[in-house]
């Protein structure tokens, strides 16, 4: 039964993550061709900033909330309190994130010049507070998450082709994203009602307690974000908008491949919490690593093809950047798998977080060293990303070896 659940969860999450690849790759080639490089740089830059806003409002509840729901063992009264308390906590965080966004927008020129676009982009982040993914993951109903995402992104993608035709239509992008998110919230509210859960804002003190518990997950997720979004933010500050566009297109391809990792790790996590068997991790590695190596070799020799498909002729100059990012693809999969699905499942939350924080600190220090040494180029940033992914993998593999006896045979 547990194998069937893992298979079902992985299949549903693969459907979700394939959709996460397909929808951006439907709109991305369109946007890169109808928008100027500078305007697409703005879109990418704001999107990177929203990643930080999203991590702040999520605050690690996708992991801690999922664990709480699993531990509740279908005690629906207890689950209702968990959902309500986490909802209040996330709304509080969303208001804090908005004030932080206003400050950053006033400080960074590229955001200040596109302030309305930036604020409208935050609407989708706020609405995500009500999507309750942790609840559906906890009760292992991944299909609902997949359907919700398909509806949300399907609406915004369809209307993007209708309303966005040139640089003057830029504001339609966040407006359509917000529309799709709002409809998804309605669907989620209906599904939660069917489970007998009444959505309401929880107790303030319980919400603060949830924030305290989830803090360690948030630190880990925020540190992980430093690997991606911070690079784009610094490129926009210290280089130029067109460089943001080139970097973003290359990273979009890398992120698309990494998206394929997520359903594997997310599908394994609930079962690892229950069984704590490292055999599951070993089997996943044995099956997927050869596929990963073949994929990395293919990307190196055929780098022009994905860049042309995604961005067109004007983005082929990003070929060296994409090749330099291949180590990120190679090391990030085992690094993530040894994290929450392995170490997190045996309660080694601090160790998991420590590896992420250490590598994030190395990444940040490396970025500012590149700036100080006047070597802040896209190639060097890409090589640094690969080195920090390798470091994370090695640190987590070491902890898995140290605590190997805590896994069950």
Image (spheres, grey):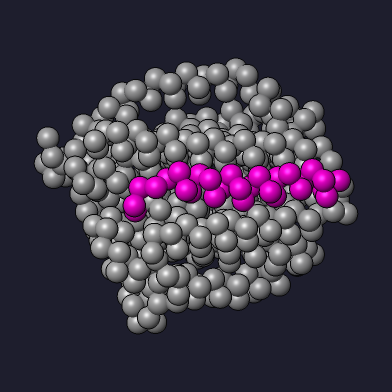
Q: Is residue 161 magenta?
A: yes
Residue at 79% of width from left, 43% of height from top?
A: 161
- Looking at the rendering, in which quadrant would you find the N terminus? top left
15 relative to 184 in the view: left or right: left
Closest to the observer, 136 or 335: 136
Residue at 30% of width from left, 51% of height from top?
A: 352
Q: Is residue 353 magenta?
A: no
Where is residue 248, by image quadrant? Answer: top right
Q: Is residue 355 visible?
A: no
Residue at 70% of width from left, 67% of height from top?
A: 119
62 relative to 241 in the view: left or right: left
Q: Is residue 172 above or below residue 166?
A: below
Which span is picked out in magenta?
138-165
Q: Is residue 262 visible?
A: yes
Closest to the observer, 61 or 84: 84
- Looking at the rendering, in which quadrant would you find the C terminus? top left
33 relative to 96 in the view: left or right: right
Where is residue 75, by image quadrant? Answer: bottom left
72 relative to 255 in the view: left or right: left
The image shows a total of numbered marks equal to 0
Q: Is residue 37 above or below residue 298?
A: below
Q: Position of residue 236 (x, y in %)?
A: 69, 54
Q: Position of residue 60 (x, y in %)?
A: 40, 60
Closest to the observer, 382 or 186: 186
Q: Position of residue 152 (x, y in %)?
A: 62, 51
């Amino acid at each position: 039964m547990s194998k069937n659940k893992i298979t079902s969860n992985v299949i549903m999450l693969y459907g979700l993550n394939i959709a996460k690849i397909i929808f951006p790759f439907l709109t991305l080639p369109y946007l890169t061709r109808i928008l100027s490089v500078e305007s697409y740089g703005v879109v990418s830059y704001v999107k990177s900033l929203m990643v930080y806003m999203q991590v702040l409002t999520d605050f690690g509840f996708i992991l801690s909330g999922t664990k709480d729901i699993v531990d509740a063992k279908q005690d629906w009264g207890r689950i209702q309190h968990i959902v309500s308390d986490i909802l209040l906590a996330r709304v509080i965080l969303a208001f804090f994130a908005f004030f932080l966004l206003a400050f950053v927008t006033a400080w960074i020129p590229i955001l200040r010049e596109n302030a309305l676009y930036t604020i409208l982009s935050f609407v989708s982040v706020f609405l995500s507070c009500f999507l309750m993914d942790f609840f559906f993951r906890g009760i292992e109903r991944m299909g609902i998450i997949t359907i919700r995402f398909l509806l949300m992104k399907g609406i915004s993608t369809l209307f993007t082709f209708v309303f966005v035709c040139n640089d003057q239509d830029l504001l339609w992008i966040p407006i359509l994203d917000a529309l799709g998110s709002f409809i998804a919230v309605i669907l989620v509210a209906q599904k939660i009602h069917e489970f007998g859960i009444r959505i309401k804002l929880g107790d303030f003190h319980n919400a603060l307690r949830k924030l305290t518990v989830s803090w360690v997950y948030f630190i880990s997720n925020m540190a992980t974000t430093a690997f991606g979004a911070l690079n784009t933010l610094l490129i926009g500050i210290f280089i130029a908008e067109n460089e943001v566009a080139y970097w973003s297109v290359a990273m979009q391809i890398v992120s698309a491949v990494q998206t394929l990792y997520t359903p594997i790790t997310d599908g394994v996590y609930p079962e690892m919490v229950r069984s704590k068997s490292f055999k599951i991790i070993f089997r996943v590695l044995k099956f997927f690593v050869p596929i990963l190596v073949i994929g990395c070799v293919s990307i190196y020799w055929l780098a022009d093809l994905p860049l042309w498909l995604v961005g067109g002729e004007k983005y082929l100059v990003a070929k060296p950047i994409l090749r330099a990012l291949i180590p990120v693809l190679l090391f990030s999969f085992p690094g993530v798998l040894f994290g929450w699905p392995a170490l997190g499942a045996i309660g080694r939350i601090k160790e998991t977080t420590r590896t992420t924080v250490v590598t994030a600190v190395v990444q940040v220090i490396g970025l500012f060293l590149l700036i100080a040494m006047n070597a802040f180029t896209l190639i060097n940033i890409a090589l640094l990303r690969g080195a920090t992914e390798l470091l994370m993998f090695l640190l987590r593999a070491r902890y898995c070896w140290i605590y190997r006896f805590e896994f069950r045979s």
